[in-house]
Amino acid sequence: MCAVIRRVVIPLILAYALASGCSGSSSGSSSASAVSSKETVRTAQTLPARGTVKLPDGRVYTVAAPGQVLRLDDVTLNINGMDWMSTATLDGNFPPGTKYVATAAITIGNTTSDPQTVGPTQIWLLSGSTPFLANPGGIVNKQVPAGKTRDGKVSFYLPRKQVGGLLLYRFADSTAIAEAKHVGVARYRKG
């Protein structure tokens, strides 16, 4: 697990560091579309507020603005809300430096013809140059039936309230995220 995290943290940090200046939202259609293998994707140095680009790390990123549904070829993600709880008001043991627990209420969709399971490294919270791995529980390790959606929650331990987005890997890449060629970012409204 640590080796996988190391292989993805540096590309994630680069991608999000490049995107940190692009945290605004934009108006337009209600969804970000998936990119087919025949489409030409423009190259960019930073993530857009919404749309699809290829960054210098070689990956294709599809970005959904706040309130939009993120669509990749086998998965969709909608952020229904974000809740920020101070650990000072919560009971429990938290990792050092944790000041907040962020919980995203999401709807995840499975557009394949087989049931899929939400992987433990499939959804990350990105802010600044730091990716945050989802806590166990909630929708992590839950099954999404073929062609259906599932509502659930995903939470993260954080040092402060974060502006950013949720990084989403395709179901097909959820067990090999270091090799993923196309990922998504669903931006959320500032908490």
Image (spheres, rainbow, N blue to C red):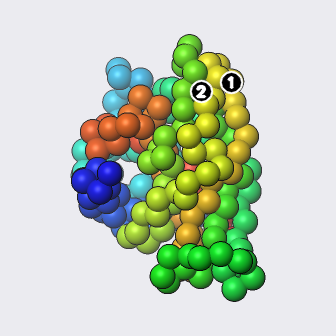
Residue 127 lies, with reference to residue 77, above or below; the image says: below
Residue at position x 46%, y 63% in the image? 132
Is residue 133 visible to us here? yes
Residue 84 lies, with reference to residue 70, above or below; the image says: below
Question: As rendered, which of 90 and 18 lies closer to the eye?
Answer: 90
Residue at position x 75%, y 82% in the image? 89
Query: Label 1: how many residues lie within 10 Å, few (<14), some (14-19) or many (20+)?
Result: few
Residue 178 shown left or right of residue 131 in the figure: left
Residue 143 lies, with reference to residue 133, above or below; the image says: above
Position of residue 134 measured from the top left corner of the image (x, y, whole percent): 52, 57
* Amino acid found under the numbered disc labelled 2: Asn
Q: Which residue is mark 2?
A: 110
**Secondary element at image label 1:** loop
Q: CA distance from mark 2 to mark 1?
A: 6 Å
Residue 35 shown left or right of residue 155 in the figure: left
Position of residue 13 measured from the top left corner of the image (x, y, whole percent): 33, 64
Question: As rendered, which of 93 and 51 lies closer to the eye?
Answer: 93
Query: Label 2: how many residues lie within 10 Å, few (<14), some (14-19) or many (20+)?
Result: many
Q: Earlier in the sequence, mark 2 or mark 1?
A: 2
* Amino acid found under the numbered disc labelled 1: Lys
Residue at position x 61%, y 37% in the image? 142
Quarter-of-image position of residue 136:
bottom right
Q: Which residue is mark 1?
A: 148
**Secondary element at image label 2:** strand
Position of residue 144 measured from the top left corner of the image (x, y, whole percent): 63, 29
Residue 57 shown left or right of residue 109 in the figure: left
Query: Is there CB contact under 8 Å for labels 2 and 1?
Result: yes
Is residue 33 visible to us here? no
